[in-house]
Amino acid sequence: MSAFTAELLAICMAMGEAQSQNLPRVHFESDSLSSVFGIGDSALLFDADVEGIFEAIREIALLYPSWSYLKVSRQANAFADSLAKWTASWRVFGCIDLNCLPVSLLRQSFCFEPP
């Protein structure tokens, strides 16, 4: 799976979670400019393998007009990127208790010693 496809699936999963909790306002951030623009512009064309994911994302987005989508720098998204790589390498799925995260991931991402 490409990093772009993984990014879209992560957005879709986050949107599904926010939808299941019926959250009225959610701020989604991504370091992928294509992902953020693709949500708001259905005229953009993508490969068939990601177009279906975009379609699902756009359908949910239409139901929640108060949700927002912003492009952030890769540096601002470093923890999410590290977490995604860690979960993929260990094949971790679903909700992750923060106490289960490795200390090395927290040190690397936040530059401090956790308690």
Image: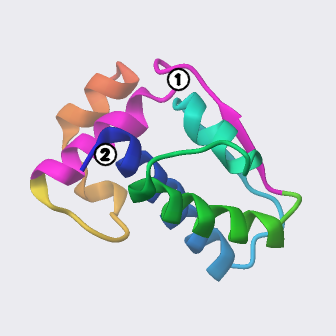
- Front-most of residues 34 and 107: 34
Q: Amino acid at mark 2?
A: Ala
Please report the bounds of the magenta region as a residue range: 67-89
The picture places residue 38, in percent across and down from the top left corner, at: 64, 44
Using the rendered image of the protein, determine whether residue 113 is visible from the camera's viewpoint. no
Q: Are marks 1 and 2 in contact (CB under 8 Å)?
A: no
Badge 2 is on which residue?
Answer: 84
Label 1 crowd bin: few (<14), some (14–19), many (20+), radius 10 Å: some
Q: Earlier in the sequence, mark 1 or mark 2?
A: 1
Secondary element at tag 1? loop
Residue 68 on image: x %, y %: 78, 48
Q: Residue at coordinates 82% horizontally, 60% vertically from top-left?
A: 25
Q: Which residue is mark 1?
A: 76
| Residue 34: quarter of image | top right
Helix, strand or loop at mark 2: helix
What residue occupies the far right of the structure in this picture?
66
Give the x, y percent position of residue 100: 24, 58
User: Which residue is at the front of the view, 78 or 2?
Assistant: 2
Q: Is residue 8 above or below residue 82?
A: below
In the shown orientation, is residue 18 left or right of residue 115?
Answer: right
Instruction: Give the residue at x 72% y 51%.
Output: 42
Q: Residue at x 88, y 58 (%)?
A: 66
Q: Residues within 10 Å of mark 2 (few under 14, many from 20)?
A: some
